[in-house]
């Protein structure tokens, strides 16, 4: 998921990380994986918000396939009654039925696909209730106003067992001054 392109470019596979200026409770301390971004808008999932709901309780067939922790993640405030599955293929050249590539081996998996057709092709799977969506130009405007940092993603960000420190870890690995924000206090005036 990492390349040498412009890190401010909004495209599939990039992460948008909430800055302290973003006060919307849906996105405070959120790390969002962009699944689609074009002139019509952007769509992504918050990758660091596990819920207490076990996948086995709602999508039992997928319980043995999802990455630890085996819970649904709160993908965002839109469409919370539906689910999106982000999958990582073992082999990029062996995409199963129901898989739509996002970037490299990472993509979306149709949960109506029979588990037995795909389970041996997956290295990781995470299921998200809901998603984050922005209309045309909306996310670009939020980035320009300082609400989001745009950074390259890594596969491990999506399938991390404990997403608690994800914001800090994603920012810490960035070049230059952006890495300093990993240790920034909530209210710098109190520092």
Image (cartoon, rainbow, N blue to C red):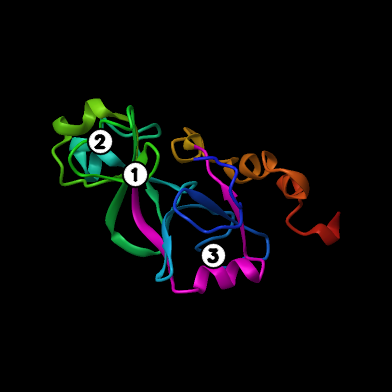
Q: Where is residue 151 in the image (x, y as percent from the top left)?
A: 59, 50
Q: Residue 25 carries which label?
A: 3
3D distance between C-alphas at marks 2 and 3: 37 Å
Q: Does the magenta stretch include residue 145?
A: yes
- Are the two marked residues, 2 and 1, in contact with CB atoms closer than 8 angstroms? yes
Q: Residue 90 carries which label?
A: none
What residue is shown with label 1?
107
Residue 169 higher or lower than 133, as above or below: above
Q: Where is residue 101 in the image (x, y as percent from the top left)?
A: 32, 45
Residue 136 shows in the view = yes
**Tag 2 secondary structure:** loop
Residue under label 2, please give it: 95
**Image: 85 above or below 17:** above
Residue 34's x, y, as percent? 45, 54
First in sequence: mark 1 or mark 3?
Answer: 3
Circles 2 and 3: CB atoms closer than 8 Å = no
Residue 132 lies within the magenta run: yes
Residue 43 visible in the picture: no
Q: Over which residues does the magenta segment extend? A: 127-154
Mark toward the start of the polypeptide (2 vs 3): 3
């Amino acid at each position: 998921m990492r390349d040498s392109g412009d890190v401010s470019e909004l495209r599939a596979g990039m992460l948008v990380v909430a800055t302290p200026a973003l006060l919307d409770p849906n996105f405070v301390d959120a790390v969002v994986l962009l699944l689609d971004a074009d002139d019509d808008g952007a769509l992504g999932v918050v990758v660091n918000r596990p819920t207490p709901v076990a996948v086995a309780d709602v999508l039992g067939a997928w319980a043995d396939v999802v990455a630890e922790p085996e819970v649904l993640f709160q993908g965002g405030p839109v469409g919370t009654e539906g689910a999106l599955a982000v999958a990582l293929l073992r082999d990029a050249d062996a995409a199963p039925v129901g898989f739509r590539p996002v970037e490299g081996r990472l993509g979306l998996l149709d949960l109506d696909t029979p588990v037995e057709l795909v389970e041996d092709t997956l290295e990781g799977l995470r299921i998200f209730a809901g998603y984050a969506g922005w209309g045309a130009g909306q996310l670009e405007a939020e980035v320009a106003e300082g609400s989001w940092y745009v950074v390259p993603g890594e596969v491990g960000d999506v399938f991390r067992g404990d997403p608690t420190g994800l914001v800090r870890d994603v920012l810490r690995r960035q070049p230059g001054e952006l890495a300093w924000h990993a240790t920034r206090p909530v209210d710098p005036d109190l520092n």
